[in-house]
Image: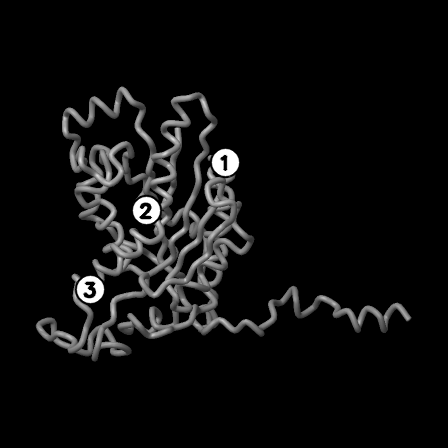
Amino acid sequence: MGAVHLYLIRHGESVDNVANLYAGSRDAPLTNHGVLQAKRLGEHLATRTAAAPAPITHVFSSNLQRAHRTAMLVAPVSPTPSPQTGDADALASSKLREKHFGTGEGQSFGARSSGDRHEGAEDHDSMRVRAERFVDEYLAPLFACVEGERDEEQEGGSIGTESIIIVAHGIILGVLARVLLAAGNFGSLATGTSDQQQHFSWSNTGYLLMRVKTMPPAVDAKESAAGSRGGTQNAKWPHLKLEIVEVNCTDHLRGLKKTRGGIGSAKFDEKQKTLSAFFKPTASKRKHEDS
């Protein structure tokens, strides 16, 4: 049965997370700990997608560095080429940027009273439009391919499963998830899926896993006739079913402790050497020792 696994991932810990600042459009870098979180997630997903098997074929991220850097650490090797497109896609999109907090950008969480609002802050409708455009431009063609595989499956063809990585920010990820779950998209929503959307949350590098799969003809007809919860016969993808598999999964962070002395919370420096790299002989040093 054709299927797509959607991993909606929040970026690793950033310096603004540590400082408890409103950081929407601010381009805050990852901390050293945030980089370790992302690497742990990359190892976790590499194992999980290989076991399915559901190779990563597309990687999308916000174009803010904390998200894009996380995406590159999560999927450092080029994703497996998609059978549909013949090539893998990697994209940093402004549509996945976090909510802009207006005058609140860079302020601490406790800098305003509960009744105050940040002037110039982005509203929910604006974020919803961005999320809808992202779905229409990048995910809809992939869903259409999965739905098209339904006919191939009925003819005895071999159908695979693919994984799509989306790395962004907590608020916009919640908006994106609800856009996907909105009525009129899929022919069916798995039981309990509508209820789960009330409890979305994302820790740093936590992920929400959604599964989109084709419905066998017999089940398709039965669920369409019954008007399955959240689904509709007039849906964009009437032969596809959406279900939520996991919410805020952080299994990959078990046992990971932040380095003390402020090192873990410090900005990650690309030029900083690890201890193993520091003691590893350089090429010139080895050449000198060999002579």
| Front residue (pair 81, 201) | 81
Look at discs 2 and 3 and give the one toward the viewer.
2
Q: Name the residue under label 3.
A: 126
Q: Above or below — where is 28 with respect to 84?
A: below
Expressed as whole percent of the image width and height from the top left, the position of residue 282 reads 74, 70
- Which image quarter holds the N terminus? top left
- Relative to 251, is 228 on the left or the right? left
Q: How many marks do you count on the picture?
A: 3
Q: Which residue is drawn at 14% across and 25% down?
A: 226
Viewer-side residue, 19 vs 240: 240
What residue appears at the point 71 percent right and 66 percent down from the top-left corner?
Answer: 280
Residue at 49% in and 71% down: 268
Q: What element carries label 1?
A: helix
Residue 108's place in the image compared with 84, above or below, is below
Query: What is the distance, in whole Å, between disc 2 and disc 1 at their CAs?
Result: 26 Å
Callout in the foreground (2, 1)? 2
Rendered image: mark on residue 140: 2
User: Quick one: SS at disc 3?
Assistant: helix
Task: Give the residue type at disc 2.
Answer: Ala
Question: Which image quadrant is residue 93 in?
Answer: bottom left
Q: Earlier in the sequence, mark 2 or mark 1?
A: 1
Amino acid type shown at disc 1 = Ala
